[in-house]
């Protein structure tokens, strides 16, 4: 969205009267009352792995935005490829498939799609002719294709081009859109391709555009109203926790809500604040999904895995979102902190770009409150100390680190005791290094979970592991936040872990 359009969306929100709140109170100092929080993940920012059933009703649900496809010609016995990764022709001469041979879908309707190639161009027809190329840097209706699956073998597809003809691999270096309707779906038909899905995304963009905004609206509103309810805030307050970290998306602050997102999440966030006030809980607002996606992952609402945050326009839009959210909740006694961005990553988020954004966003928060903390998340795969010197000059700043005994080869093959030793030695040492700045900035372990790569671990194993995490992460000067309150995978659900005696949290 262009900045001018963004501001037209945004400006009407300033006339909305903020929710009625009590006078702003200074938050408890973490030195005397550290934050023991739980993330309300998968609620206002969709993550399909947290609640997969949300996607069950989407027609043709295998083909959502960001689905990565590889297509093999049955006659050439080779994969389609965007030559040079894009900017020229499409060929059918690769014996194996990797990045250049992978196409990302943009879903237009239930059955029509656009194909984005490795370098970001879109597949289309050359100058209105029949040769298939990937030269356009922006999507256009003329680049919309229909994928037709064989009714008896869904791995076989034909692709109808905008001109009404089907794609065919005429030779290994000539892919054209000039094949007729007739087919026997056999290996002698150059318009037949074997499809291999190598990646899927199930985030906010996928669910809203998958259903279409009209159908997605009742699905998401029912989810917002039932996934997290008032009793959950009571449960949180009764089980040793004193705060919630609420992931939100940038569209929450925009009126009218921009396509394809669903209107109403702001009112749910208002309700969360009222529940937090009722049960004496603090709230960290976490900007989990920024305009353009700050990391390309589904949890940042990326359309196709691309990361476009980091331009002047997207940063200006993000500042506007921070301005609105801070202004709206600054007077709530439960408003503890604004987290400016969740898990940014290179290349879009260079360190210099991120520092500039963090400084401007920090100043924006301070227009409305001197009490709320301002949390700055480290970049993914970057040094955990890279923000310390910068943040040390900003009063009330917090650096957010995320610690999982998952996702990297460091944890492959580790047994129970080795995982616990890693916590007590490696994690403890790293946290001590990050948190050695004499209170400025403070440090939050903003995401962690009692899950690991250990197979067939017993309940007692999980209890020991969780206790070690609580011990180590409890030393963080600001506190910690478990990921997440509810999840279909039990160990990722703090509610399940507490209820079933796997973890016990004390103040």
Image: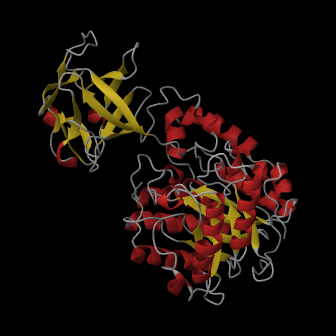
Q: Please indicate, yes or no, whether residue 124 appears anywhere in the rendered image.
A: yes
Q: Position of residue 283 (x, y in %)?
A: 73, 65
Considering depth in this image, is 74 or 176 the residue closer to the camera?
74
Q: Position of residue 486 (x, y in %)?
A: 71, 48
Q: Which residue corresponds to the image point at 82% horizontal and 48% vertical from the top-left?
A: 500
Considering depth in this image, is 187 or 440 the residue closer to the camera?
187
Question: Tell me, what colour scheme is on the image?
Answer: secondary structure
Q: Which residue corresponds to the image point at 51% horizontal and 69% vertical from the top-left?
A: 319
438 in relation to 43, above or below: below
The quarter holding residue 330 reads bottom right
Q: Is residue 80 left or right of residue 19?
A: left
Q: Please indicate, yes or no, whether residue 330 appears anywhere in the rendered image.
A: no
Image quarter where the C terminus lies is: bottom right
Q: Is residue 90 left or right of residue 398?
A: left
Q: Is residue 18 left or right of residue 413?
A: right
Q: Position of residue 332 (x, y in %)?
A: 77, 69
Q: Position of residue 411 (x, y in %)?
A: 54, 59
User: How many numbered discs?
Assistant: 0
Considering depth in this image, is 409 or 96 the residue closer to the camera?
409
Q: Which residue corresponds to the image point at 76% horizontal and 50% vertical from the top-left?
A: 459
70 in relation to 167, above or below: below
The quarter holding residue 369 reads bottom right
Q: Is residue 30 left or right of residue 363?
A: right
Image quarter where the N terminus lies is: bottom left
């Amino acid at each position: 969205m262009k900045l001018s359009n963004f501001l037209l969306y945004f400006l009407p929100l300033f006339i909305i009267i903020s929710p009625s709140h009590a006078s702003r109170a200074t938050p408890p100092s973490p030195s005397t009352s550290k934050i023991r929080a739980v993330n309300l993940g998968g609620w206002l920012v969709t993550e399909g792995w947290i609640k997969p059933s949300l996607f069950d009703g989407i027609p043709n649900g295998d083909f959502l935005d960001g689905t990565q496809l590889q297509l093999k010609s049955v006659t050439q016995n080779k994969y389609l490829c965007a030559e040079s990764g894009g900017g020229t022709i499409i060929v059918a001469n690769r014996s194996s498939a990797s990045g250049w041979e992978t196409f990302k879908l943009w879903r237009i309707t239930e059955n029509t799609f656009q194909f984005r190639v490795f370098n970001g161009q879109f597949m289309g027809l050359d100058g209105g002719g029949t040769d298939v190329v990937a030269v356009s840097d922006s999507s256009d209706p003329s680049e919309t294709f229909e994928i037709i699956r064989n009714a008896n073998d869904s791995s076989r597809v034909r692709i109808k081009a905008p001109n009404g003809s089907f794609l065919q691999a005429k030779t290994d270096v000539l892919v054209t859109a000039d094949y007729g309707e007739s087919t026997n779906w056999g290996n002698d038909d150059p318009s037949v391709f074997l499809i291999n899905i190598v990646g899927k995304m199930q985030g906010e963009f996928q669910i809203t555009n998958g259903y279409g905004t009209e159908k997605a609206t009742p699905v998401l509103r029912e989810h917002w109203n039932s996934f997290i309810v008032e009793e959950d805030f009571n449960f949180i307050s009764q089980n040793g926790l004193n705060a919630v970290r609420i992931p939100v998306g940038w569209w929450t602050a925009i009126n009218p809500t921009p396509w394809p997102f669903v209107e109403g999440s702001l009112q749910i966030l208002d309700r969360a604040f009222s529940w937090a006030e009722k049960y004496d809980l603090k709230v960290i607002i976490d900007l989990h999904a920024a305009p353009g996606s700050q990391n390309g992952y589904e949890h940042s609402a990326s359309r196709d895995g691309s990361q476009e945050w980091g331009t002047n326009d997207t940063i200006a839009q993000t500042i506007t979102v921070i301005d609105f959210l801070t202004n709206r909740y600054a007077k709530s006694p439960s408003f503890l902190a604004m987290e400016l961005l969740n898990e940014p990553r290179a290349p879009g988020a260079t360190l210099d770009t991120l520092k500039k954004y963090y400084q401007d966003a920090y100043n924006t928060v301070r227009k409305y409150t001197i009490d709320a903390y301002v949390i700055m998340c480290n970049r993914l795969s970057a040094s955990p100390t890279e923000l310390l010197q910068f943040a040390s000059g900003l009063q009330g700043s917090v650096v957010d680190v995320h610690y999982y005994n998952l996702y990297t080869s460091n944890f492959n093959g580790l047994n129970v005791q080795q995982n616990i030793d890693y916590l007590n030695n490696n994690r403890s040492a790293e946290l001590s290094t990050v948190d050695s700045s004499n209170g400025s900035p403070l440090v939050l372990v903003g995401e962690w979970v009692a899950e690991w790569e250990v197979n067939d671990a017993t309940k007692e194993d999980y209890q020991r592991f969780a206790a070690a995490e609580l011990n180590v992460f409890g030393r963080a000067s600001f506190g910690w936040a478990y990921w997440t309150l509810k999840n279909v995978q039990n160990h990722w659900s703090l509610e399940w872990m507490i209820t079933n005696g796997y973890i016990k949290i004390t103040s």
